[in-house]
Amino acid sequence: MLTKNFLRCRRRNELSGEEKQALEDAVSQLRPYGARSVIARENVALHESNLLVEGMVGRYMTARNGEQQLVAVHVVGDFLDLHGFPLKQLDHNVVAITPVKLAMVPHGNLLKLTSTHPHLMRLLWFSTLLDAAIHREWIFKLGRLDAIGRVAHFFCEMNVRLKIVGLSDGLSFDLPMTQSDLADACGLTSVHVNRVLRQLREGKLLTFTKSHAVILDLAGLSRTGEFDPTYLYLDKGTL
Amino acid sequence: MLTKNFLRCRRRNELSGEEKQALEDAVSQLRPYGARSVIARENVALHESNLLVEGMVGRYMTARNGEQQLVAVHVVGDFLDLHGFPLKQLDHNVVAITPVKLAMVPHGNLLKLTSTHPHLMRLLWFSTLLDAAIHREWIFKLGRLDAIGRVAHFFCEMNVRLKIVGLSDGLSFDLPMTQSDLADACGLTSVHVNRVLRQLREGKLLTFTKSHAVILDLAGLSRTGEFDPTYLYLDKGTL
DNA sequence: CGCAATCTTGACGATAGTCAAAGGACGTGG
DNA sequence: CCACGTCCTTTGACTATCGTCAAGATTGCG
């Protein structure tokens, strides 16, 4: 079941069996991508969207001086580039962070679903708005938190998002990102991320070594990152 | 025609006359709000969405220390809280910046449209993804531009968005925001916004006094803000 | 084993925040 | 019509956070 993690634990995961099947049927093939390979390039016409079945994906924008900003991270169960269905093309690059597997859904099949399954379409719409809600939270994070807050917030968010798809036990998880990737996500330099990670370690809030995060004090980390998972629209009782 | 500015000049403004009428018919009433009044509060169930017919609106998130972050600004023609239709409730506050007029569309009417007008629904979906694209650009702006770049970018964006609905002549426009509002939009303090505005003035790029912006050097301002309007998905030939 | 990428640390500098004070702009009410 | 208060803007002096540059340590991979 390629779609089993789609909207998992979300407040509106009310797909009927028939809808799940319709979505599953819309998948044309399963495609692998290597780590750091480009899945979708900006300003290129798109003809399919992809459900992320395995691995981790990032959306990047690039500044004139070459600095990158990660504008979104996707985990298993996220529907990538669903934005590309109404938008037809994207304003940024989508890159595999790890080796990934994608369930490809041609836009033609999605188009059919809009007429035959309006409720399913609203759920697909909902999933893109979840992305938008996460974007807003990141705007807040970058605009109003200091370096340690931003990094703490990022780890809190990843912890929750990975937990609902079974990839975090609630306090520890694998995160296949370098300190430089973290810097791109948090609007910092890798040097400063390194200093912040030391602070978090010394403050007994979090350790992050060898792509593995261990949260030592979830309440403290959440407080530092001003993290409140409401914006993730989780099912009641998920956490 | 309350909906005349909806998706105006956007790459996918392909509403048929019948669709425009259907949207117009979905409006139940026109409502005024006073400046700084709250249109939608976070975590409260929503039962209608609103098309912004007059005025300017902001979406705010608040940090623990009381600092505010503006996560989005809406101008005439934007469909407010369409996010609230699939999401059912919002994760932030929506506040009138000026006195505004809203065309209220009950969710029940939108729901009917999903079955009867799938193409119109895709356009509504599209408009929410436009918001998401703007969010991503703001993430980039906050994560990777310095203070002067952020402010320059903001003015460039507002210039374009106001121009397509006839509220900027391409180089000057009214912007009913204080320097403190600008600070909330750009992740800065109002003191520093003031210094940046002086820099822009002295650099002959932009003046902003008494809620009126005049762009003296559009190319220079765009360069400073690393602004490229692609992410606004404009119709070819709009600018 | 050796190279390349990543991590770590220190010294220094620049950008933006903080604190404080004073000067406009504007509206209200006497 | 002026006085007053409030909000907004402007500026300066000082501080703190984060970036830059550089070098060395560690890790992982071929």
Image (cartoon, coloured by chain):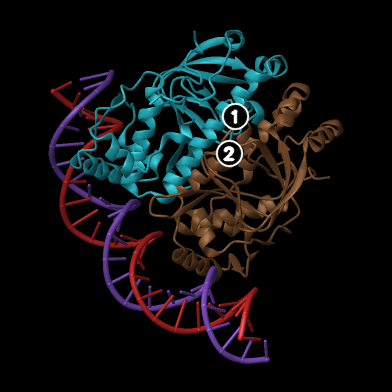
Chain colours: A cyan, B brown, C red, D purple
Which of the two residues, B202 or A232, is positioned nearer the viewer here?
A232
Q: Amino acid at mark 2?
A: Ala
Chain assignment, label 1: A
Q: Does the CB distance between marks 2 and 1 fall below 8 Å? A: yes
Which of the two residues, A106 or B60, is positioned nearer the viewer here?
B60
Secondary structure of the residue carrying numbered label 2: helix
Pointer 2 residue: B133
Question: x, y (%) of residue B173?
Answer: 68, 61
Which of the two residues, A155 or B85, is positioned nearer the viewer here?
B85
Residue B149 to residue B93: above or below: below
Question: Looking at the rendering, which quadrant does residue A82 occupy?
Answer: top right
Chain assignment, label 2: B
Crowdedness near tag 2: few (<14), some (14–19) or many (≥20) residues, C-alpha within 10 Å: many
Question: x, y (%) of residue B23?
Answer: 79, 35
Secondary structure of the residue carrying numbered label 1: loop
Q: Is residue B10 visible?
A: no
Q: Residue at x 59, y 61 (%)?
A: B177
Which quarter of the image is occupied by the C terminus of chain A? top left
Residue A116 to residue B3: above or below: above
Residue A28 to residue A175: above or below: above
Crowdedness near tag 1: few (<14), some (14–19) or many (≥20) residues, C-alpha within 10 Å: many
Q: Amino acid at mark 1?
A: His
Q: Residue at x 74, y 59 (%)?
A: B169
Pointer 1 residue: A83
Question: x, y (%) of residue A161?
Answer: 41, 27
Question: x, y (%) of residue A15?
Answer: 57, 15
